[in-house]
Image: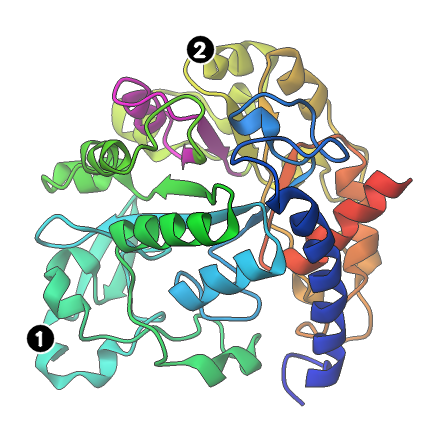
Amino acid sequence: MTQGAHPAPARRTVLGAAGAAGAAVLGASAALPAGTAHAADTRGRDRGHRSLPVPTVIAHRGASGYRPEHTLGSYQLALDLGAHVIEQDLVPTKDGHLVCRHENDITGTTDVADHPEFASRRTTKTVDGTSFTGWFTEDFTLAELKTLRAKERIPGTRQENTLYDGRWAIPTFEEVLRWAEREGRRRGREVWLHVETKHPTYFRSLGLGLEERLARLLRRYGRHRADSPVFLQSFEPSSVRRLAGLVDSPRVVLLSGATSRPWDFVEAGDPRTVADLITPAGLRWISSYAQGIGPTLDLVIPRDASGRLGTPTTLVRDAHARGLILHPYTQRNENGFLPAEFRRGTDPNAYGDVFGALKAYLATGIDGIFSDNPDTALLAAADLRSR
């Protein structure tokens, strides 16, 4: 049995239900001008990110629970399911093009190992203090990367996704921008993107700075304004601050575990940790150059020693007090990713009570959530609005 304990009919049932829910929302909004809020599920009628439905469902690397991540197939399915925003992670090629991969190490997400002509490119690198052995985007030209095909990153967990291995190439971010333009015209509304700069300090040290390249593309495609349908995000605050000096697009600082330090802080000798950044003073500093934060869900509701949800923190209240929106990450349907009380059975790859978990997270007042399964998150968001 693939996809954990879920046969295909069970998953199609979930997809069908979510598709109906998403279609209802999209059908109502499709007739509205691009950027216009839908009164039933948005905070306001202004253009820009405040016009998005709340809670906003952000398709994490596309519909990565159902298709290999960061492929046009994954992005397209997420949009078809009704996701409000589609996420891209950006890394550079040797010749300076921005491509969509979660990591510059493409060993597990492409068929590069099957290409004997690239066998000599396999190497060991230290990225943000961690050693990796494999193949890396910065050692390939775009033309060379385009000879590779994408594949499922975690086939043991998402066995059904392997059906699509080899179907899509690695997309450039410019190709995604063109896709979003086409889909926006076809649907009569803007297609929102959530764009992350990956390892920006590391790439800048190689002469492959991400922010300037990203800003040029945003300007070329008219997504550089404060009300543009795009979020710019990074785990490195300095990258977000650099982007703030280049474009006016809304920006989000991503936040990992409380004891961790952003890599640019490590490089600069800044002793602050994420715990310092989520204090009122830290949030005030973030609000001086960003419009939101993307914390791990554990920063919103920590888990206890047994893996069960504890008491929500004050992060939502404190961030909202500084005018910041919250887009936590990441909701996944499989037991192995869920808090202990929402797991069902013993198979870590089987689906658990994800609606129960989402109910708890959304009840905290977060403004949106990253989801590998946007159809599921959309149904949970509809449940919240109906109560």
The answer to whether residue 113 shows anywhere in this view is yes
Query: Which residue shows up at 28% across the image and 55% down it?
Result: 175
Question: In terms of depth relative to the viewer, which is nearer, 74 or 202?
Answer: 74
Q: Position of residue 320 (x, y in %)?
A: 66, 18
* Rendered image: mark on residue 331: none
In the visual, does 384 lie left or right of 256?
Answer: right
Mark 2 Cα shell of 10 Å, populated few (<14), some (14-19), many (≥20): few
* Quarter of the rendering containing residue 3: bottom right
Q: Which residue is mark 2?
A: 288
Circle 1 or circle 2, nearest the eye: 2
Location of the N terminus by quadrant is bottom right
> What's the magenta region?
231-256
User: The residue tagged with tag 1: helix, strand or loop?
Assistant: helix
* Quarter of the rendering containing residue 261: top left
Question: How does the figure colour the protein chain or chains?
Answer: rainbow
In the visual, does 72 lie left or right of 67?
Answer: left
Q: Position of residue 250 (x, y in %)?
A: 44, 25
In the visual, does 249 lie left or right of 27?
Answer: left
Amino acid residing under circle 2: Ser
Q: Position of residue 380 (x, y in %)?
A: 78, 50
Q: Is residue 15 above or below residue 356?
A: below
Q: Is residue 122 above or below residue 78?
A: below
Q: Position of residue 88 (x, y in %)?
A: 40, 49
**Extreme residue toward the right, this view:** 387
Q: Which residue is mark 1?
A: 120
